[in-house]
């Protein structure tokens, strides 16, 4: 397969190239967009996946919609496609082809010294407050297509209906990651579904990479759009396979092997850097603090060219310093 850079932060092969995400992103930039944190490129990816590839054979699952920008991209892509009018609504749970799952709030910081207010695409939000009304207002024009599921995802059960496209932006803990795998992945259509893991090329949440390494025989990696990793199903995931949480049950050596099971040669160095930090977090979470600190020192040496951004509050130097601080004091982040 031929792999190539398709745009800044976009890398992949023929499947991703055919979606022409950069062109779709340019069109979105010229239009009014829904509030949220999701990048324009990832919104364009979802829009084009629905417009160009959705056949109506399965539902669309959106885990972690936040203010609803991903749901809007999916609904607009579905409407721009050519099949929605010919698809019977009773094929999908609740008669809706798109199912969005959202807890409904972002946790507030424990310290009162931290500013709790954030602005996302012009919409202000106070951490700890419910944003359900914002979400409902955002998707209101598309409620004939979208079913919202508000609350703890771990209490949700999928009906078993086929899933054709799954956009997962909710695996912020190892337990949520295991639940997503168990509930949704067996419903993907073998050879006919697309899975997008939004938090994959991120410096933390190593359980996602461990899980996808464990499932490498069931998916083909198609490329990257910023922090999202795009896969096509090659065969159905058996329920008993999906029920296994490799991050929980795997040994230290097994988890490292699964984390590194798929090579992503050609991605930008900043994303290679994120994966290297993720590997160090995995070491620490599997009880190898000293090895993790050694790994961070090696990361600092290898990626020294990326670390001259100390003024960026969320930049590369910040990420390395955060990893060093959290791993050294044993207070990484909530994983359960």
Image (tube, rainbow, N blue to C red):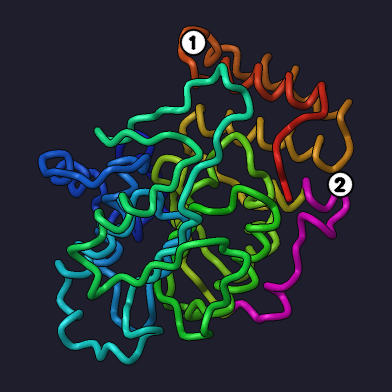
Instruction: Estimate how packed mark 2 is, as few (under 14), some (14 to 19) or many (20 or more) residues with alpha carbons within 10 Å.
Output: some
Q: Is residue 58 above or below residue 255?
A: below
Camera-side residue of 18 and 106: 106
Residue 266 drawn at (x, y percent): 48, 38
Residue at 52% x, 61% y: name it.
151
Camera-side residue of 169 and 112: 112
The answer to whether 171 appears left or right of 292 in the picture is: left
Sequence-wise, the earlier of marks 1 and 2 is 2
Residue 77 drawn at (x, y percent): 21, 63
Residue at 57% x, 15% y: name it.
317
- Magenta residues, start to end: 237-256
Judge whether residue 73 can be spotted in this image: no
Residue placed under numbered mark 2 in the picture: 252
Residue 106 drawn at (x, y percent): 50, 42
Check disc 2 and report its element: helix, strand or loop.
helix
Residue placed under numbered mark 1 in the picture: 309
Report which quarter residue 186 is drawn in.
Answer: bottom right
- Measure how far apart labels 1 and 2 are at the Cα level: 33 Å
Residue 128 drawn at (x, y percent): 50, 39
Magenta region includes residue 141: no
Residue at 68% x, 22% y: name it.
299
Quadrant of the rendering where the N terminus is positioned? bottom left
The answer to whether 283 appears left or right of 131 in the picture is: right
């Amino acid at each position: 397969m031929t792999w190539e850079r398709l745009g800044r932060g976009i890398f992949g092969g023929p499947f991703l190239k055919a979606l022409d995400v950069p062109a779709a992103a340019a069109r979105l930039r010229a239009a009014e967009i829904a509030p949220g944190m999701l990048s324009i490129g990832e919104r364009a990816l979802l829009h084009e996946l629905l417009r160009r590839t959705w056949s109506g054979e399965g539902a669309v699952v959106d885990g972690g919609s936040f203010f609803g920008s991903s749901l809007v991209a999916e609904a607009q892509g579905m409407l721009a496609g050519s099949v929605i009018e010919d698809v019977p609504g009773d094929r999908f749970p609740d008669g809706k082809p798109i199912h969005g799952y959202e807890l409904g709030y972002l946790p507030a910081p424990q310290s009162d010294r931290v500013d709790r207010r954030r602005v996302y695409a012009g919409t202000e939000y106070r951490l700890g407050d419910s944003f359900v009304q914002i979400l409902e207002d955002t998707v209101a024009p598309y409620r004939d297509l979208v079913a919202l599921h508000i609350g703890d995802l771990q209490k949700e059960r999928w009906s078993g209906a086929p899933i054709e496209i799954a956009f997962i932006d909710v695996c912020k803990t190892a337990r949520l990651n295991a639940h997503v795998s168990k509930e949704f992945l067996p419903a993907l259509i073998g050879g006919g579904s697309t899975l997008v893991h939004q938090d994959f090329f991120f410096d933390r949440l190593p359980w996602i990479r461990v899980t996808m390494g464990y499932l490498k025989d069931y998916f083909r990696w198609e490329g990257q759009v910023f922090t999202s990793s795009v896969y096509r199903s090659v065969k159905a995931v058996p329920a008993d396979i999906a029920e296994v949480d490799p991050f929980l049950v795997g040994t230290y050596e097994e988890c490292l092997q699964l984390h590194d099971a798929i090579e992503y040669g050609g991605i930008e160095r900043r994303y290679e850097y994120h994966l290297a930090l993720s590997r160090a977090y995995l070491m620490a979470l599997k009880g190898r603090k000293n090895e993790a600190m050694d790994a961070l020192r090696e990361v600092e040496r290898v990626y020294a060219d990326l670390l001259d951004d100390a003024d960026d509050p969320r930049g590369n130097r910040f990420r390395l310093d955060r990893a060093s601080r959290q791993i050294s004091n044993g207070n990484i982040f909530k994983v359960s």
